[in-house]
Amino acid sequence: MSSHIVTCGACGRKNRVPAAASGVPRCGQCHSALPWIADADDTSFAEVAEKSSIPAVVDLWAPWCGPCRMVSPALEQVAGELAGQVKLVKVNIDDSPGISSRFEVTAVPTLLVMRDGEVIGRQAGAAPAPALRQWVTGVLADDSARRDS
């Protein structure tokens, strides 16, 4: 399973963050929550996204898609702003036809928010970081309210 090197926003230390793990990644030096960004494919999706200990924002994208390339930095920004609260999982649909078929992807980018293996939010198309952050936090708030009632 792959990992990403993430720079801590609080202290600047570089940390290796695995694609799948229990808990939430924290900086080895200052213990601040780190952005959790991982790649997944047909074989690793269950482990990386569905079994995530925190809600996963899934980016279903394709390398030939211009809007996908535009939304990727915005999603990474949102993952940084919501460090410790969400995990960003990127899935290249060209390399993962099973995931594409399973979620009936007809447009890219398609974004999903998953909690405990279930899709709780879905959106197609690119948007700027503030709109994406508002969408993700709204989906999470609505899901929490539904769970509490």
Image: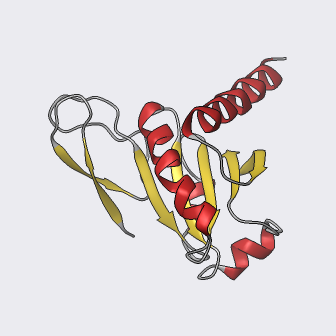
Can residue 108 be seen at all in this image of the molecule?
yes
Pick the quarter of the image with the C terminus.
top right
Please tell me which residue is depicted at 73% across the width and 73% down the height of the picture: 100
- Residue 26 location, quadrant: top left
Q: Is residue 146 above or below residue 17?
A: above
- Residue 61 location, quadrant: bottom right
Can residue 46 be seen at all in this image of the molecule?
no
Picture coordinates of residue 142 (x, y %)?
77, 26
Side of 133 relative to 104 (left or right)? left
Q: In terms of depth relative to the viewer, which is nearer, 134 or 37? A: 134
Side of 112 relative to 34 (left or right)? right
Picture coordinates of residue 27 (x, y %)?
24, 37
Please tell me which residue is depicted at 76% across the width and 29% down the height of the picture: 143
Side of 81 relative to 108 (left or right)? left
Please tell me which residue is depicted at 48% across the width and 32% down the height of the picture: 82
Q: Is residue 36 above or below residue 9?
A: below
Please tell me which residue is depicted at 53% across the width and 39% down the height of the picture: 86
Pick the quarter of the image with the N terminus.
bottom left
Picture coordinates of residue 58 (x, y %)?
62, 54
Picture coordinates of residue 22 (x, y %)?
44, 46
Could you tell me how many numbered marks the image carries?
0
Q: Is residue 80 above or below residue 10?
A: below
Coloring applied to the structure: secondary structure
